[in-house]
Image (cartoon, grey):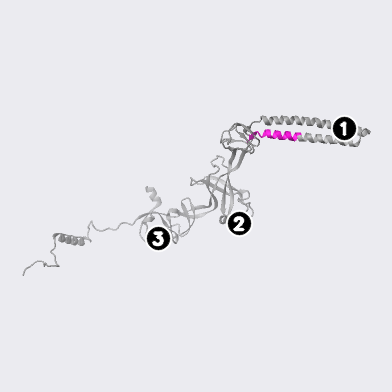
Amino acid sequence: MATGLRTGPNHRRPTLGNLVLLGLAVHLTGGCSGDNPNAYVAPPPPEVIVAKPELRAVTTYLHYTGVVEASETVELRARVQGFLEKVNFQPGQRVKTGDLLFVIDQREYQAIVNQNKAKVDAAKAAFDLAVTTLERAQEAFDRGGTSDLELREKKAERDEAQAAHDLANANLAQAQLNLDFCEIRSPMEGRITRNLVDVGNLVGKGESTLLAQIVQTTPCYVPVDVSESDVLAVRRELEKAGKLSANEPGQIGPGQWRPCELAFTDQTEFKISGRVDYVEPEINKETGTLRVRTRFENQDEALLAGYFTRLRFPQSTREAMLVPEAALMTDQQGRYALIVNAKDEVEVRRVSISALDGTSRIVEEGLSADDRVIVLGVLKARPGAKVTPKVQEAAAASN
């Protein structure tokens, strides 16, 4: 009988390669329990940065936006017709009350003043003559040398001369006023715009030509439209403190206006201090808002009319718990944070939050002061999985 491997249509002779693979598999299977350097080792838990919630006094604010407005704006216009003769300022300079800014050709108006002065003198002479004539007529009437009708005529002439004299004085006053209008002076202190009309042009013909504007921004105003809900919250706060009826609108104490702070659009800090100085007496029915005007002294003229700014009004100060805004996440059930428990396992904590304070968020409910909140590495943390927590302060020191 022949010996060896069976061959046939369903059996193949093992090749050398198959025998080598079979031996390698047996070798690996037998060595898994030993000190084989190729054995599988599970990776360590991912490292995350944790920090405890911060407890500190926090001031809550009402935030709004507004546009800076000048406290005063005056248009300088030509009130008489004539050719512009002088421009006595540099565009953009600060001017004071009474400064001479424009001069219109005065020669024509000076001549009219002189004419009316002569008419006043003539009317005065005629009036003096009428008074003297009436005195003589009165004496003659007393002696019986003239009739009552003649005396009445002399009185009428005296009154007519008086009216003519008054009219001449009125015309002189009008002529002098037109002459004065040839000099356009600053009615207030502020910064003047460029001149809108150049020397040599005719102004005031048929209209009061606009020559320039003066803008006063020291102080300046920033009006905002406060929502009805915020108005109610502020009034409830004052009512609780017993100050609602004792103070004027916009005040937090007798003569003490509610403060506010301002920041430019390219700033995160509110560095400019101001106050409320006016509150409208009724809610706008169309918008459901209340117009509140804030005042900033602006002595350094950092605020220009037209600036878009952000405002905040301090509402109350209290002890609060805060965590970085980046540590809070959102899903369909609301906001939550990931914490590391005593077993270094990740847990989900549902939280109730309120205002943002800088880069941190106030947490009203859901966390305790001893919780280790994951502030960095949240993408590596899975609920129920182990992690390697590293305290934030230590992580910053090592870097």
Tag 2: Cα neighbours inside 10 Å, few (<14), some, or many (≥20)?
Answer: few
User: Which residue is labeled 3 in the image?
Assistant: 347
CB within 8 Å, label 3 to label 2: no
Q: Residue lying furthest front in this view?
A: 206
User: Which residue is labeled 2 in the image?
Assistant: 239
Task: Decide: is 61 above or below 147.
Answer: below
Q: Residue at x 72, y 34 (%)?
A: 173
Instruction: Give the magenta-colored segment's residue range.
Output: 168-185
Q: Which sits earlier in the primary sequence, circle 1 or circle 3?
A: 1
For marks 1 and 3, give the one nearer the viewer.
Answer: 1
Query: Relative to 113, is 51 on the left or the right?
Result: left
Which quarter of the rendered picture does the N terminus lie within?
bottom left
User: Which residue is labeled 1 in the image?
Assistant: 135
Q: CA distance from mark 1 to mark 3?
A: 116 Å
Amino acid type at mark 2: Glu
CB within 8 Å, label 1 to label 3: no
Task: Decide: is 95 above or below 248.
Answer: above
Amino acid type at mark 3: Glu
Describe the element under mark 3 as helix, strand or loop: strand
- Is residue 178 in the magenta section? yes
Q: CA distance from mark 1 to mark 2?
A: 79 Å
